[in-house]
Image (cartoon, grey):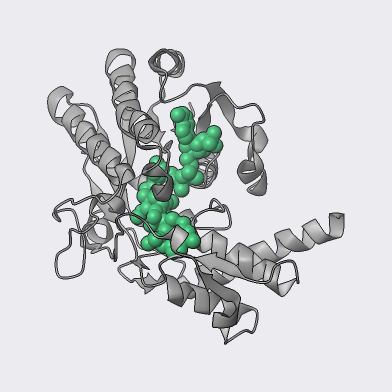
Amino acid sequence: MAKTALITGILGQDGPYLAKLLLEKGYKVYGLIRRYSSPHYENLQFLGIMDKINFVDGDLTDDASLLNVIKTVRPEEVYNLAAQSFVAASWEQAKITTEINALGVLSLLNAIKYFSPTSKFYQASTSEMFGLGNDNGYQDENTMFHPRSPYGISKVYAYWMTVNFRESYGIYTSNGILFNHESPLRGIQFVTRKITDGVAKIKLGMAKNISLGNLAAKRDWGFAGDYVEAMYLMLQQKDPDDYVVGTGEFHSVQDFVALAFKQIGVSDWKQYVIIDPRYNRPAEVPHLRARTTKVNTKLGWKPKVTFEELVSMMVTADIKRQEMVLKNS
Ligand code: NAP
Ligand code: G4F
């Protein structure tokens, strides 16, 4: 019998990569989608798996829909990837961010507790929870949380609720504390995709510049396709646990910009970049870098794609996309 997995956030960046991995492992994959006037399946189509997903309707802010899905599907594994995941928007939309990212997780955990308590549960926790917290410039499983955004705060609630269901009810729940991971499927508003999309358009004469905020911020950027393997591994262990997942390296936004322009043969990138303070955040997280000893040793997980390969992959994909746009226009 094929194992069953439910993925929330199936239409985002990570959902399709995880679904592809689980399908390759023989899983029957259910994907939770919420009500949309015009559903958008392009990330699943990009990976060629659109027709292999069993879609179920539900919304993290609608308890009854989650109870119904969990009761009907009774998945062996639940990967909760759904979120209002854009940090910058979380100041202006703090309440809905909290309802989805914090209370939505409580609702999903309750649905599991009542209707499928043997389901294993993965929570998409984040390095944003660390915020200013660090230990000699690194963050790991023992680093104090000091979130700097309503998004980070909402995720801290979900993190502890996930731990609490493990400790209170013995449910197999794990937090993956993932550092930034990117890919050609990354949402266009996140800084990496914004840069690679802009670079592609500049190369093809479709744009003149890119407007950005804080170029000094540093992130530990990896490839989403590698990170979903860590999610899967977390639910295959004898006992549930929480893991930091990253590369252990960090780079500034400026490093990313310079490397992306290098891909199209431009070294003097400054002529194409406008610094616009509108993109600065009320409270910034200046640097995030993972100490990955636990995930490396306990799960045997290591990233495969380097920073340089990631930037190159994203620029190449965006050039291809824009060439198609030009061809069809
Ligand atoms: P993403 O591209 O923004 O995808 C999030 C998905 O959640 C979207 O498909 C969205 O659906 C869905 N969603 C939002 N609100 C929902 C609701 N109320 N009910 C049901 N679904 C809802 O995010 P991602 O980059 O794939 O990240 C996956 C998860 O990992 C998120 O929880 C994120 O916070 C977390 N995380 C991401 C990173 C990273 O660097 N990517 C790092 C650490 C943690 P629609 O498509 O309908 O909008
Ligand atoms: O790409 P970002 O928007 O990602 P951020 O805020 O680090 O959050 C992402 O990673 C988290 C994990 O650490 C996830 F939990 C979260 O869901 C999301 O996936 O911004 C990265 C950095 C920030 O310091 C920001 O201030 O880039 C800086 N930045 C500079 N100019 C910009 C811009 N960010 C955006 N989005 N747009 C800009 O123009």
**Along the viewing direction, whichever of 234 and 106 lies nearer the viewer:** 106
- The image shows residue 301, relative to residue 147, as above or below, that is below
Furthest residue in direction front, as rendered: 277
Q: How many marks?
A: 0
Instruction: Kindly indicate the quadrant of the structure image that contains residue 60.
Output: top left
Residue 176 image position (x, y, % from top left): 30, 46
Instruction: Kindly indicate the quadrant of the structure image that contains residue 172.
Output: top left
- The image shows residue 242, relative to residue 82, as above or below, that is below
Instruction: Kindly indicate the quadrant of the structure image that contains residue 205.
Output: bottom right
Residue 16 image position (x, y, % from top left): 54, 43
At x 57%, y 87%, the residue is: 267
Within the displayed image, which quadrant is ligand 1 positioned in? top left
Q: Is residue 124 visible?
A: yes
Q: Is residue 3 visible?
A: no
Furthest residue in direction bottom, as rendered: 267
At x 40%, y 41%, the residue is: 92
